[in-house]
Amino acid sequence: MTDASINPAVPKRHGSLMSADARTAKRNAAEKRFQMYGMAAIGAGLFFLVVLIGAILSSGIGAFQQTFITVPVYLDEAKLDKKGNRDPAEMAKVSTFGYNPLIQKAVLAAVEEAGIETPLKKSKNMKALLSASAAAQVRDVVLANPDMVGQTVEFRMLASSRVDGYLKGRVQREDVARDKNIDAEHLDLTDALREAGIVSKGFNAGFIFGADASESRPEQAGLGVSMLGSFFMMIVVLVLSLPIGVAASIYLEEFAPQNRWTDLIEVNIANLAAVPSIVFGILGLAVFIQFAHLPQSAPLVGGLVLTLMTLPTIIISTRASLKAVPPSIRDAALGIGASKMQATFHHVLPLAMPGILTGTIIGLAQALGETAPLLLIGMVGYIATNVPDGIAAGFLSPNSAMPAQIYEWAKRADPAYYERAWGGIIILLVFLLTMNLIAIILRRRFERRW
């Protein structure tokens, strides 16, 4: 080696190899700064996640509790069954207006029996304490059990949204000065009834299993019927999107020739995955409702719309899973005499199944939380008050969905609906987390090493 072969651009190192020079120290310092930036980013993300979860829980946990008034009600035969036949058909002619005076008298009697001093001396003054659904609740029980007429029966009825909000801290005393539904005397009476054990808070099962209610009965509103609407929609999405998406992915990845047509299809699938969801709602409105004349606000239509929205996601994730299978698996199957279809379905598809299932469940979770497509097909404007009376009605009868119901509650005026909107978000997040957990379990369960 001569002196000409020595690169003059490389500076000579002075000092020991065991000690870092200035350039190495600079690189090490830059690496430590980058690690600190990464840790700071993770810390900031966790901080905002904790703040978000805390805000959701603090605002929505009250929806799982409700205030109840427990009083014995005398079911006056002269009011409810004048003929004394105990015929439910005849007793059904008595509307809720006939039950309201009996309930209000029962509350006033409970106040007097407890020795509570109040300026509210008339039974009609008790109306502000009770939910508008209390009379319907008592009426339904009486019609189901006609023999109760003439007896004194204890009922646990919903309190009004103002009373419920007062005990939860949502309604303040200074707010009632502008409220026509309740005043300070009612709040004083509420405190006294709570001390007497007549008014109490308990678990609100009706919020999870009940139906939506009108503007005048927010304390009765529940998410149960809209949960059924989401369930039937997800069945439609699963039954249609999984086989169609997997079949399209297998053809494009394993059998389709590489030409301009398949390239065009692949580009369009990638573009459809980025299309705003409300565009699919407009498409569903035009095709399924206006052209095909399918019933508006039906879970079937909602499921078809969400299927169109979910298909690109499933196709892309399935193709990625198929592409991740090593080519040697295909070559080995073909080398021992398997056909192209046998190699695909007997060897490639089982190895890609964990990724396919994961992508499908994530696509379903995305569809479960969508609201915008449902706006266009009327699932927001419909108040879901009745449980479907069969499987066919579950798909074809008008209904709502969980995200649509939450959106509807959030725009209503009563603060009790705002609380229920946050509570609905908690339930929706539980469903989404459960679906993602199932995706992780299935991926671990069917994952194979090669």
Image: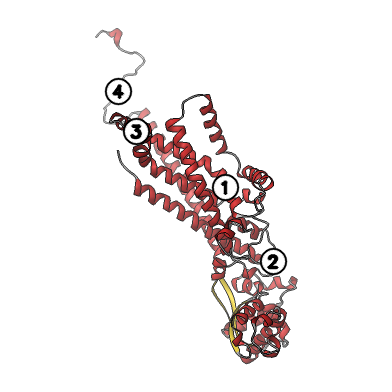
Residue 129 can be seen in this image:
yes
Question: Residue tagged by mark 4?
Answer: 14
In the displayed structure, 144 sits above or below 271; it is: below
- Mark 2 belongs to which amino acid? Glu
Question: Residue tagged by mark 1?
Answer: 306
Real-space Cα separation, disc 4 to disc 1, in angstroms: 68 Å
In the rendered image, residue 2, in percent from the top left (x then y), is placed at 26, 7
Real-space Cα separation, disc 2 to disc 1, in angstroms: 29 Å
- Mark 3 belongs to which amino acid? Pro
- Mark 4 belongs to which amino acid? His
Say which quadrant the N terminus sits in.
top left
* Mark 4 crowdedness (10 Å alpha carbons): few <14, some 14-19, many ≥20: few
In the rendered image, residue 379, in percent from the top left (x then y), is placed at 64, 55
First-in-chain label (2 vs 4):
4
Left or right of residue 31: residue 139: right
Left or right of residue 124: residue 110: left
Q: Which numbered dot is residue 376?
A: none
Question: Residue tagged by mark 2?
Answer: 215
* Mark 1 crowdedness (10 Å alpha carbons): few <14, some 14-19, many ≥20: many
First-in-chain label (2 vs 1):
2
First-in-chain label (3 vs 2):
2
Q: Which numbered dot is residue 326?
A: 3
In the displayed structure, 71 sits above or below 52; it is: below
